Image (tube, helix red, strand yellow):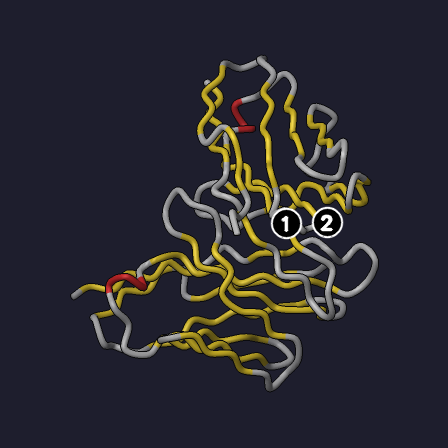
Amino acid sequence: EDQVTQSPEALRLQEGESSSLNCSYTVSGLRGLFWYRQDPGKGPEFLFTLYSAGEEKEKERLKATLTKKESFLHITAPKPEDSATYLCAVQALGQAGTALIFGKGTTLSVSS
Amino acid sequence: DTGVSQNPRHKITKRGQNVTFRCDPISEHNRLYWYRQTLGQGPEFLTYFQNEAQLEKSRLLSDRFSAERPKGSFSTLEIQRTEQGDSAMYLCASSSKGQGGHEQFFGPGTRLTVL
């Protein structure tokens, strides 16, 4: 069964304190791995797509990396406005592989 | 780029009533998805349309749920005889066919509360 597990469930950081969020996945064949940011009461906001092991993507203070079993979202020198829930999702290969399978997310709180 | 829009944003209903939600995808996107999200969980897939054809339905989509996309543009999700367990955020997403994975762009969601 395709599955996504995110850790930790919650993370509290001081402004400027860098850290990483983990996304472990099990999928029959990976079409793509996606990272989203979700603010309370809003829909997920697309951040990155990663397709193959070794790939990296960057956007401002965020950097996403991918291996064959997991992905990391590195947050460098975070600011309070980075506080949100970060969701990881995978999309499997195959005709029926259009649905995204999400993890439960990591809720990040950054204090000044 | 207007993004994905959903209406209403909030809906409160009594158990046993029927409700209908609307989703307007990004205009050039031919793929449309419905997901459901409960507190502390990630979104769970419900159903998927390519143009007007409903190509995939989750086991979560019971007989009380029906979705349509009549002209391949907007979509509606109807829940009949609502139950308290239907209380959740209902999210719509759209994407366009491309190489590799298909990024899905989400709307703001419709929050349903069943009393």
List the residue tagged with mark 1: B94
Disc on the earlier residue, 1 or 2: 2
The relative height of residue A94 versus residue B29 in the rendered view (above or below) is: below
Element under label 2?
loop
Q: Residue at x 64, y 80 (%)?
A: A68
Q: Nearer the viewer, mark 1 or mark 2?
A: 2
Quadrant in the picture for residue B57: top right
Which quarter of the rendered picture does the C terminus of chain A lie within?
bottom left
Q: Residue at x 52, y 44 (%)?
A: B107
The chain letter under disc 2 is B
The chain letter under disc 1 is B
Q: Looking at the picture, which amino acid does disc 2 mark?
A: Asn
The percent position of residue A24, horizontal first and vertical second, equals 56, 70
Q: Of the numbered discs in the image, which one, if any, rests on residue A35?
A: none
The percent position of residue B20, horizontal first and vertical second, equals 60, 23
List the residue tagged with mark 2: B30
Q: Residue at x 69, y 27 (%)?
A: B65
| In the rendered image, residues at marks 1 and 2 fall on the same chain | yes
Mark 1 near mark 2, Cβ–Cβ under 8 Å?
A: no
